[in-house]
Image (tube, grey):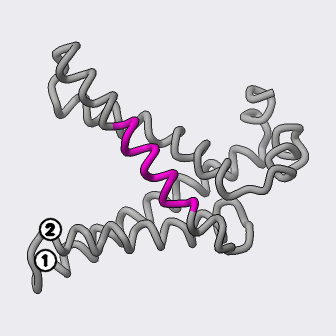
Amino acid sequence: MARRYMTDGAARSQFLRYLLAGLANTAVSYAVLVLLMQWTDYVVAYTLAYVLGIALGYWLQTRFVFRVPLRWGTLVAFPVGYMVQYLLGVAVLWLLVERFGTAPELAAFVVIVMNVPLGYVVNRYLLLPRTRRRESADGHD
């Protein structure tokens, strides 16, 4: 079923919107980070920019990518998806660097590339109602 879903034109369009939203969110978050660093400590700036990035990401994912309404339940669950990706990323990063001797820079790149499709799947699961996920899997999205 997953293969059928990924060949569907609507699914490709949705994934492209996910990539575009991610690029826009990254650009805005980075710009905010750089601006905030002009007035505050870099750790405070990073934290504020990161929180803003999660909020902007939630809005972009719900309204632009998956085209679902904003809901309190998904608003609360959305940062959990980020935490899952973060923890898995740290684990893979550690394995690559400490166990397989991969250069940290290359390992970080691998983790980032891994997190793109993982983030899509996690966010899709968290944000789309179960019936919409099922319809998409059947090619009806």
Q: Which residue is mark 1?
A: 37
Q: Does the magenta-highlighted stretch encompass residue 114?
A: no
Q: Secondary structure at mark 2?
A: helix
Main SS of residues in magenta: helix
Name the residue nearer the viewer: 72 or 65.
Answer: 72
| CA neighbours of label 2 inside 10 A, class few (<14), some (14 to 19), many (20+) | few
Task: Work out which quarter of the rendered image holds the N terminus and state it.
Answer: top right
Residue 54, given in percent of the width and then of the height, sits at: 44, 66
Q: Is residue 30 left or right of residue 74?
A: left
Q: What is the span of residues highlighted in magenta in the rendered image? A: 77-89
The structure residue drawn at horizontal position 19% and vertical position 80%, both measured from the top left corner, is: 36
Name the outermost residue toward the bottom.
Answer: 39
| CA neighbours of label 1 inside 10 A, class few (<14), some (14 to 19), many (20+) | some
Question: Looking at the image, is 102 positioned above or below residue 74?
Answer: above
Name the residue nearer the viewer: 29 or 74.
Answer: 74
Residue 132, given in percent of the width and then of the height, sits at: 83, 52
Q: Secondary structure at mark 1?
A: loop
Q: Which residue is mark 2?
A: 43
Q: Amino acid at mark 2?
A: Val
Q: CA distance from mark 2 to mark 1?
A: 9 Å
